[in-house]
Image (spheres, rainbow, N blue to C red):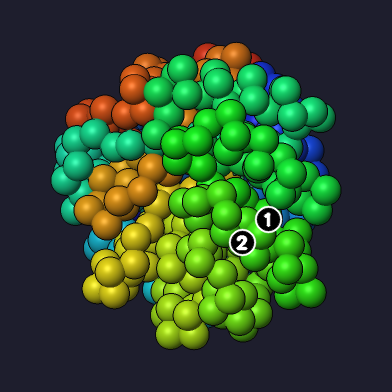
Amino acid sequence: MQITEVRLRHLNMDLVAPFTTSFGTFVDKEFILVEVKNGEGLSGWAESVAFSAPWYNEETIKTNWTMLEDFLIPLVLDKEIEHPRDVSDMFSHIRKNNMAKSAIEGAIWDLYAKEKNIPLSMALGGELEKIDVGISIGIQKTVPELLAKIEAGLKDGYKRIKMKIQPGWDVDVIREVRNRYPDIPIMADANSAYRLKDIELLKQLDQFDLMMIEQPLSSDDIVDHATLQAEIKTPICLDESIHSVEDARKALELGSCKIINIKIGRVGGLTEAMKIHELCKERNVPVWCGGMLESGVGRAHNIALTTLDNFTMPGDTAASANYWHKDIIQPEVTVYDGVITVPKAAGIGYEVDYTAVDEFTSYSKRYTN
Ligand code: OSB
Ligand code: MG
């Protein structure tokens, strides 16, 4: 396959409600939408999951745009690409910048699947036709507001509730949630808000029968997480600490976690995400697909990846309407009883709605040779 043109668009979409994590609050989502074209009228799509500021990892919208324009687009434009799995090797001499790499690699995967006229899930080797999803609920101002959000999530059928925690919004809040809902699957995501010195507090979480605690300690750490995991019963799930299959191998060998959250952007693309999935499968470690408040394009990629068989725990791919007044794909992502039916159309399986894209685009640029 050959990419004859790449188009980058800068979009900004308002969230239906603010979303607060231990590192900050989102009221809207700025992101780069990538479109790759093959000269025969087909387009492949993906989005960069980098945020406006470097608070989740070191990347931002602007660093991603620069990396794409100066380095990554020139590496793929007009090159003969035999298979999308080769793209990450073409980028291997460029350090880090995983979200920028993933954005273009994902668009090439979509284009490849469209050229073959098969769903992206099938191109990845995924077989599940329905996937289970949960919902991630941000830090709220009050416990009643949190309980109301949980109630709504349960009513919508989500398979598990993830609540964000941070110092001051943890043990006492989870206790109230547990008292109100003794049996539901709950987990907590700290987004790196604690340190080993907080171990006594983290041990108290064991009493709540959480499915897991996600990324309690520093964002690149696997050493202190191993110490913590040895001291607590609750399984640790790593998110921010895992950037590659090598990171995953080291974390599993150290005993730093028992579960891995795979985010395509964080690990540099679908090919690396599949390698982590394989490694975890060999070692009987469950994985699930994380979210980055993506638009429908990013969610479509998450859905396709989740069809691989070791995605045995519900992911964060909630419905479009959980995030957006209007999404940029047709149909929008819908969830019934906590289940998404995997689309069967070619590529990402949803049509990109150009009118909606134009509405949210503030600037764009075309790249050709
Ligand atoms: O840590 O998983 C995370 C949102 C923004 C940044 C980081 C995270 C999250 C979420 C929500 O938990 C995921 C989603 O619903 O897309
Ligand atoms: Mg997380």
Secondary element under disc 2, as helix, strand or loop, is: loop
Residue 73: percent from the left, percent from the top? Answer: 53, 57
In this rendered view, identify the residue nearer to me: 81 or 238. 238
Describe residue 367's horizontal placement relative to residue 122 as left or right: right
Identify the image quadrant of residue 213: bottom right
Residue 367: percent from the left, percent from the top? Answer: 55, 46
Q: CA distance from mark 2 to mark 1?
A: 5 Å
For badge 1, the amino acid type reads Asn
Visible residue check, residue 318: yes
Residue occupying image coordinates x 44% and y 19%? 156
From the image, tell me which residue sits under label 2: 215
Residue 227: percent from the left, percent from the top? Answer: 61, 81
Residue occupying image coordinates x 36% and y 48%? 313
Position of residue 204 relative to residue 184, above or below, is below
In this rendered view, identify the residue nearer to me: 64 or 4. 64
Residue occupying image coordinates x 43% and y 68%? 258
Mark 1, ligand 1, within 8 Å: the answer is: yes
Task: Answer few, some or many: residues within 10 Å of disc 1's Cα (few below 14, many 20 plus, some between 14 and 19).
Answer: many
Secondary element under disc 1, as helix, strand or loop, is: loop
Position of residue 148 relative to residue 339, above or below, is above
For badge 2, the amino acid type reads Gln
Quadrant of the rendering where the N terminus is positioned: bottom left
Mark 2, ligand 2, within 8 Å: the answer is: yes
Visible residue check, residue 124: no
From the image, tell me which residue sits under label 1: 191
Position of residue 328 relative to residue 261, above or below, is above
